[in-house]
Amino acid sequence: MSEVKKKKTWWFSKIESREDALKVIKGTSIWFFFIATLNLAFAFWMGFYSSTLSTTVYLDAAIGATYMVGGLFLRLYSSRTVAVFLVIFAAIMAFFVFAFKSNVPLALIILWAAIRAVVATFKLHGRFRSDTLASNAPRT
């Protein structure tokens, strides 16, 4: 009988190979796209149904655009710089969420996704770099 392995999601699985790191980067970038879509939809909805545009609408749109661009660059380039920027940005957003006591679980999930992106990108460009170079080497 063959053993059936339980497939773990990218949220908590160990990053033990290049493929695992790429899977985590893909999952976090999709998560940032989702969060950006929520922020942009909220900003559009508030701007559409509000008689006056407040700074909250512009702030939500800017936060959504930042997560969208960060998720896009993370997905396309697997960049450590982008991942570190996203974790710093998510930490700043989490600080303000904690200060105003609004939607703390979502802020923690975003922060966790950003931390996972940092770990995955550093492992991809560090420990698993030789796997990348070996797979791109010309075959004789």
Image (cartoon, grey):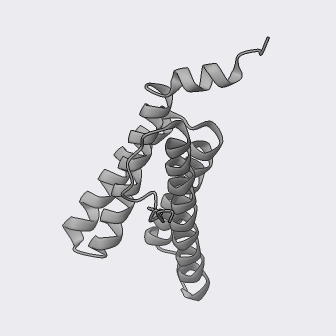
Where does the image place residue 52, in percent across and percent down from the top left? Answer: 53, 81
Q: Residue at x 61, y 46 (%)?
A: 75
Which residue does the image show at 46% across and 62% down from the upper left?
5
In the rendered structure, the answer to whether residue 28 lies left or right of residue 103 reads right
Quick one: 41 or 14, which is closer to the camera?
A: 14
| Mark count | 0
Nearest the eye: 80 or 5: 5
Residue sitting nearer the eye, 111 or 46: 111
Vertical arrangement, residue 63 with respect to residue 47, above or below: above
Quick check: 140 left or right of 17? right
Q: Is residue 92 above or below residue 17?
A: below
The extreme top residue here reads 140
Q: Residue furthest right?
A: 140
Q: Residue 58: x, y in percent?
A: 51, 65
Residue 57 position (above or below residue 86): below
Taking depth in this image into account, of 103 and 111 the one nearest to the observer is 111
Q: Position of residue 102 (x, y in %)?
A: 28, 76
Residue 117 in percent (x, y) is at 44, 46
Up the image or down, 81 lies above or below 61; here it is above
Quadrant of the drawing holding the C terminus: top right
